[in-house]
Image: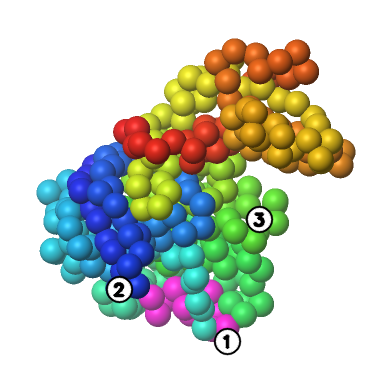
Amino acid sequence: MLTIKNLSKRYDNGIQALDNVNLDISSGMFGLLGPNGAGKSTLMRTIATLQEADTGSIFLDDLDVLNEKDEVRKILGYLPQEFGVYPRFSAEAMLDHFAVLKGVTNGGERTALVKRLLEITNLHDVRRQKLGTFSGGMRQRFGIAQALIGDPELIIVDEPTAGLDPQERNRFLNLLSELGENMVVILSTHIVEDVRELCDRMAIIDEGRVLLSGDPRQFVGELSGKIWQKSVNKEEVDRHRASFNVISSQLLAGRPTLRVLSDASPGAAFDPVTPDLEDVYFSSLQQPAARV
């Protein structure tokens, strides 16, 4: 269990990146959703012992994350948003190097470990290929391979599917899902679909505050009968925003389609629709208070 209590961080430029964050994260896949600049990466770097907090605490079971950083790093796997590689090294050679840095000094043990990680991430067939030639999805899978060195109890992945094509994204998400069966995996993202497909627990964060935390299926169910949809002309959008609680809009066949949150029908021209996690996400961003 990862327990975060009253965690706050203000940068020197005055930005309040984290504002009294409280979360309990158990084994399995946990999704952390929020727009760019919401504080997700700050929270992930703090959990990963790469950044100090101003106040608060983080415990992984009985391990004090903020004050026992060396011990945490022994059981932590981390894939940051920007993951650099040495382009002229092969995947096999680079993983071998990372394993040495992690303290795997026995040559035979290290060879077996590297082989197992390459197979888990479906990179064994390209193990001698230079990392500089890898596609985005292959690089992300390599990132997970290095994060798995040392059999971590906690894995953090920050915006892992941004920029991946649909096939690579599906392959990567399937890999994360398998990993989440045996350890705590925190998936930080602004892509709602990633959380919808993988996570049975989630939180939404914005402006450094936790707006909502719990079971995404429960939150979707609570919106049942409250989401309404209407296609309008472009010149009608502002008027509808002023009159209704429009939580999102998108173009369908060239026309804006509005989704409105309302306990009762907003009018005859609105159709009831089945809510989804995007509705939970967009409606939460409008709420002033946390719901945990």
Please provide percent x and percent y for residue 289.
Answer: 35, 36
Circles 2 and 3 in contact, beta carbons < 8 Å: no
Question: Which dot, 1 or 3, sits closer to the camera?
Answer: 3
Taking the view exactly as shown, the residue that stands out farthest to the bottom is 88
Identify the secondary structure beneath mark 3. helix
Q: Nearer the viewer, residue 6 or 267?
A: 267
Magenta segment includes 95? yes
- On residue 168, the disc is 3
Mark 1 → mark 3, Cα distance in angstroms: 23 Å
Closer to the camera: disc 2 or disc 1?
2
Image disc number at residue 12:
2
Type of secondary structure dominating the magenta stretch = helix
Q: Is residue 178 magenta?
A: no
Residue type at tag 3: Glu
* Colour mode of the rendering: rainbow
Q: Is residue 117 above or below residue 57?
A: below
- Look at 52% across and 83% down and name the residue there: 86
The quarter in which the N terminus is drawn is top left
Q: Mark 2 or 3 closer to N-term? A: 2
Q: Residue 133, relative to residue 31: is it above or below?
A: below
Task: Label 1: state its secondary structure.
Answer: loop
The residue tagged 1 is 88
Q: Which residues are magenta?
A: 87-98
Q: Residues within 10 Å of mark 3 (few under 14, many from 20)?
A: some
Q: Earlier in the sequence, mark 2 or mark 1?
A: 2
Q: Nearer the viewer, residue 248 or 156?
A: 248
Distance CA(mark 2)–CA(mark 1):
38 Å
In the rendered image, the quadrant that contains the C terminus is top left
Question: Which of 82/33 is in front?
Answer: 33
- Whether residue 254 is visible, yes or no, is yes
